Amino acid sequence: MEEKKSESDKKNNLYLRFTSVVMQMGAVIGGFSWFGVFLDNKYQLKTPIWTIILALFGVFISMYLIFKEVKNINKD
């Protein structure tokens, strides 16, 4: 019975870890996108080039964080 309990604890721990990764992704992408909008408004650009560049940069950073977390989970 102890083994089943520890398996469910491990499963719940994985859900919590992936939930935190999703929140990190949202914060990183949202933060970089907000900063891009800020820069576009500050320099009054016709095309939102800073928003596009910084949003994509945020996506790449968040993908790096996901790969790093999955690598850590596979070690465990």
Image (cartoon, rainbow, N blue to C red):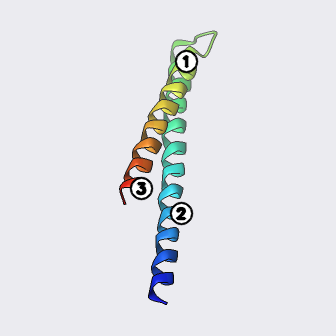
Q: Which mark is residue 62?
A: none
Residue 1 picture location, percent across and down: 49, 90
Residue 76 picture location, percent across and down: 37, 60
Residue 70 picture location, percent across and down: 44, 49
Name which of mark 2 and mark 1 comes first in the sequence: 2
Q: Which tag is nearer the camera, tag 2 or tag 3?
A: 3
Q: How far separated are the C-alphas under marks 1 and 3?
A: 39 Å
Q: Secondary structure at mark 1?
A: helix
Residue 72 picture location, percent across and down: 37, 52
The residue that mark 1 highlights is 40
How many circles with numbers are drawn on the protein? 3
On screen, residue 58 above or below 46:
below
Say which amino acid is labelled 3: Ile
Q: Which tag is nearer the camera, tag 2 or tag 1?
A: 2
Q: How far separated are the C-alphas under marks 2 and 1?
A: 37 Å
Q: Residues within 10 Å of mark 1 (few under 14, many from 20)?
A: some
Say which amino acid is labelled 2: Tyr
